[in-house]
Image (spheres, grey):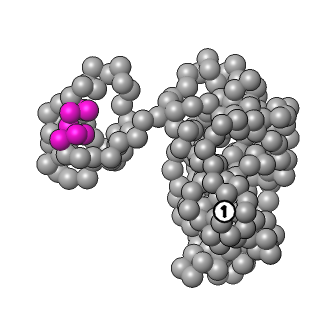
Amino acid sequence: MLRVPSEEQRAAFMKAGVKLKGILTIADDDQRWPKVTLLVKRFGLRDIVTTEYSDVDQGSARALAMLATEQHGYPEPAVDGSYLSATFDTAEYCRFCGIGRKQAAPFRLRKTPALGNSILQLNWIFDEYFVNRDTFGTVFKPSGVGCRPVVLDKTGVEIDSIVQLAVPQIVDLQVGNLAYKDCSHCGRRKYEATFLRTDPCPAPSKTDWPVSKSSQFFGDGASAFRLVLISGLLCQRIKAARLRGVRFTPCTE
């Protein structure tokens, strides 16, 4: 996966048989792969290696991590960072590692997003998801998932068409030898999340909830988030509904 910024570079990739449109995703068994790797080195582009799991792998998993493919929009008020106090109880929050915030109020959005058939994740908030109400009613509610309201920032009025998926259940992951850092300020532990690009998610202690969050925190710098896990059945329903915006990494057994 890589992003190609200049017209010169786009022309070179076109000559190699690759039509670029935003971010390029290409498999390593694609016949164009050798030419693409040479161009990546030639232009000094940033590429990311990821593992994509087959429908068979995903279909046989009892639990999977649900990961956003990209983020859109911001929690409000975003300019001065006051979304934290507007949305979270920050009594145990550490601004150095990001651990400790607890949601106490609805998320505030600048405007109503046109989600359509997509699952939304906001920038900065990597363990919460938003869907339109119809999608919630047909895909998530029948699986036993709850929801929370979302409001407009300027007025505080509830947005009728959008809901936040509610995930109160917490499970332990068998993190094994995953790399981690202990915060020098609060002492709490946070694991690196880069392994999720290529490796399965660690096994959870419980797999019969439709959706849950890891007890462990992941991320780097001042960013901290829990992994959102879903059951194999909910994964099948999301895929059957052709919802966009997320990908799935099976958990080890």
Measured as percent of width and height from the top left, residue 214 is found at 76, 46
Measured as percent of width and height from the top left, residue 36 is found at 24, 32
Can I make out residue 131 in this image? no
Say which of 146 and 95 sits in front.
95
The residue sitting at 63% across, 49% down in the picture is: 180
Q: Is residue 94 magenta?
A: no
Question: Would you name the residue on which mark 1 appears?
Answer: 183
The residue sitting at 62% across, 74% down in the picture is: 76
Which residue of the protein is positioned furthest toward the front in this rendering? 184
Measured as percent of width and height from the top left, residue 19 is found at 25, 37
The mark total stands at: 1
Q: Amino acid at mark 1?
A: Cys
The residue sitting at 61% across, 34% down in the picture is: 248
Q: Is 206 placed left or right of 163 in the picture?
A: right
Which region of the structure is painted magenta?
36-42
Magenta region's main secondary structure? helix
Q: Is residue 37 magenta?
A: yes
Q: What element does badge 1 sit on?
A: loop
Measured as percent of width and height from the top left, residue 18 is found at 24, 33
